[in-house]
Amino acid sequence: MGVSGAGASIRATVVEWPGIGAHPHRFGGTEYRLGTREIGHVHGDDLLDVPFPKKVRDQVIAEGRAQPHHILPESGWVSFYLRQEADVERAIALLRESYELALAQRARSKGRSGTLDEELAA
């Protein structure tokens, strides 16, 4: 059902973002983290799960960009199924949104709004 090579394509893009590490996910697949914060994970070539603050999650779902999480539908997580080639770019966009939110939260938690380079050096 998934898109052949989707997981590898997503990985190739996401690991290029400053500060992102790729790690095995506890339920299979690849987890992407900024420091210790997970920005999302991909299960093979089939499924992407991404955490968002509830308000953002609700907007993402309302816009049809993802579905409520397949196991925890009331959480801030969303699920996105990779069914066609164009879904790879959509998945990357969801991960990028989570990444940008994580960077912003990191800056706020440090009590300043530093540049990306300052945040990654911290």
Image (spheres, rainbow, N blue to C red):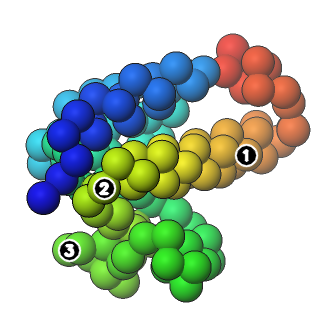
Q: Do the residues labelled 2 and 1 touch (CB within 8 Å)?
A: no
Q: Which residue is drawn at 85% across and 30% down?
A: 114
Q: Say if residue 77 shows up in the picture.
A: yes
Q: How far apart are marks 2 and 3 (CA)?
A: 22 Å
Q: Is residue 21 above or below residue 86?
A: above
Question: Which residue corresponds to the image point at 61% horizontal and 71% vertical from the top-left?
Answer: 56
Residue 87 in the image, given as x and y percentages of width and height: 39, 54
Q: Is residue 119 depicted above or below 81 in this figure?
A: above
Q: Earlier in the sequence, mark 2 or mark 3?
A: 3
Q: How far apart are marks 2 and 1 (CA)?
A: 31 Å
Reading the image, the residue beneath label 3 is: 71
Q: Which callout, 2 or 1, points at the residue further toward the start of the chain?
A: 2
Q: How far is the residue under mark 3 from the one under mark 1?
A: 28 Å
Instruction: Identify the element where label 2 is drawn.
Output: loop
In the rendered image, residue 49, in percent from the top left (x then y), is placed at 33, 57
- Determine whether 120 is above or below 73 in the image: above
Q: Name the residue beneath numbered marker 1.
A: 104
Residue 108 position within the rendered picture, expressed as x and y whole percent measured from the top left: 77, 46
Residue at the disc numbered 2: 84
Lower position in the chain sequence, tag 3 or tag 1: 3
Helix, strand or loop at label 3? It is loop
Amino acid on which the number 2 mark rests in the picture: Gln
> What amino acid is found at the position of numbered circle 1 in the picture?
Ala
Q: In which quarter of the image is the N terminus?
A: bottom left
